[in-house]
Image (spheres, coloured by chain):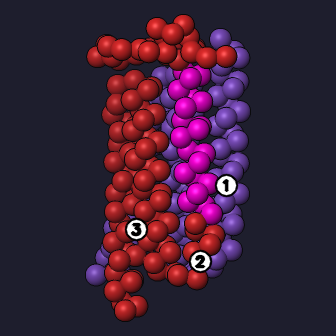
Chain colours: A red, B purple
């Protein structure tokens, strides 16, 4: 039972850091700031949550703190990414030429 | 098997850190650098959790939580500053 849980935890850790690696690769390869933000935020959030789940499998007595870190990241990561994207849009960051629709600009600069 | 997977985890995490650091160095605009910084802090939180596992000390998880809080506040502050300085 413990060996099975160890194996599951190690597999979750490896999968999580693979997601982290692909997210960072997307951050390096994507053409403009908005694509970079969405690659860098979504993939790394999933990767960190998987790593936290794997750590909870390896050390079951740590689950409250790991759950707290996971919930905190789940709430704050999209928020910081959205604030950063809005700041980039307001400072007129260059868009990729493949971008066709900009609903924020159609509504007149977006909010407030 | 478990040992190999843990080494793979460490290698992939280090690769992720180096790739995000590449965008942090190259990044043409300040917003790119802040996005790369955000990703770097998320990878560092994972690294702290992995260090807690490797050392077997649960107190490092508190460090990870405070680090997550401070990096979130830092990114919000810098984004606010970028918006005001148009």
Among numbered discs 2 and 3, the one appearing first in the sequence: 3
Q: Which mark is residue B67?
A: 1
Q: Element under label 1? A: helix
To which chain does the residue with label 1 belong?
A: B
Q: Is residue B7 visible?
A: no
Look at 46% across and 80% down and name the residue there.
Answer: A58
Q: Is residue A79 magenta?
A: yes
Residue A48 higher or lower than B71, as above or below = below
Question: Image height check: is A5 above or below B14?
Answer: below
Label for residue A62?
2
Label 1 CA crowd tier, 10 Å (few <14, some 14–19, many 20+): some
For the magenta stretch, what is the residue range? A68-88
Q: Which residue is mark 3?
A: A13
Residue B35 forms part of the magenta stretch: no
- Tell me the distance, in whole angstroms, between the alpha carbons under discs 2 and 3: 15 Å
Query: Dot 3, how many residues are within 10 Å of its Cα: few (below 14), some (14-19), or many (20+)?
Result: many
Residue appearing at x 39%, y 83% in the figure: A6
* Image quarter hosting the C terminus of chain B: top right
Report x, y in % for residue A71: 58, 57
The answer to whether the residue labelled 1 contacts the one labelled 3, judged by CB atoms less than 8 Å apart, is no
- Between the residue at mark 1 and the residue at mark 3, the CA separation in whole angstroms equals 20 Å
**Magenta part, dominant SS:** helix
């Amino acid at each position: 039972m413990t060996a099975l849980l160890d194996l599951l935890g190690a597999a979750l850790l490896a999968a999580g850091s693979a997601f982290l690696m692909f997210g960072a690769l997307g951050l390096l390869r994507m053409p403009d700031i908005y694509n970079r933000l969405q690659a860098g935020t979504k993939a790394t959030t999933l990767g960190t949550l998987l790593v936290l789940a794997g750590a909870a499998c390896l050390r079951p007595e740590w689950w409250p703190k790991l759950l707290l870190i996971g919930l905190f990241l789940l709430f704050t990561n999209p928020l910081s990414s959205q604030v950063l994207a809005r700041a980039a849009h307001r400072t007129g960051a260059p868009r990729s030429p493949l971008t066709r629709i900009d609903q924020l600009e159609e509504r007149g600069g977006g909010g407030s | 098997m478990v040992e190999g997977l843990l080494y793979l985890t460490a290698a992939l995490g280090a690769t992720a850190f180096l790739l995000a650091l590449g965008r942090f160095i190259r990044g043409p605009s300040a917003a790119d650098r802040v996005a790369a910084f955000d990703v770097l802090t998320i990878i560092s939180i994972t690294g702290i959790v992995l260090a807690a596992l490797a050392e077997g000390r649960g107190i490092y998880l508190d460090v990870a939580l405070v680090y997550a809080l401070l990096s979130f506040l830092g990114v919000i502050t810098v984004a606010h500053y970028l918006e005001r300085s148009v």
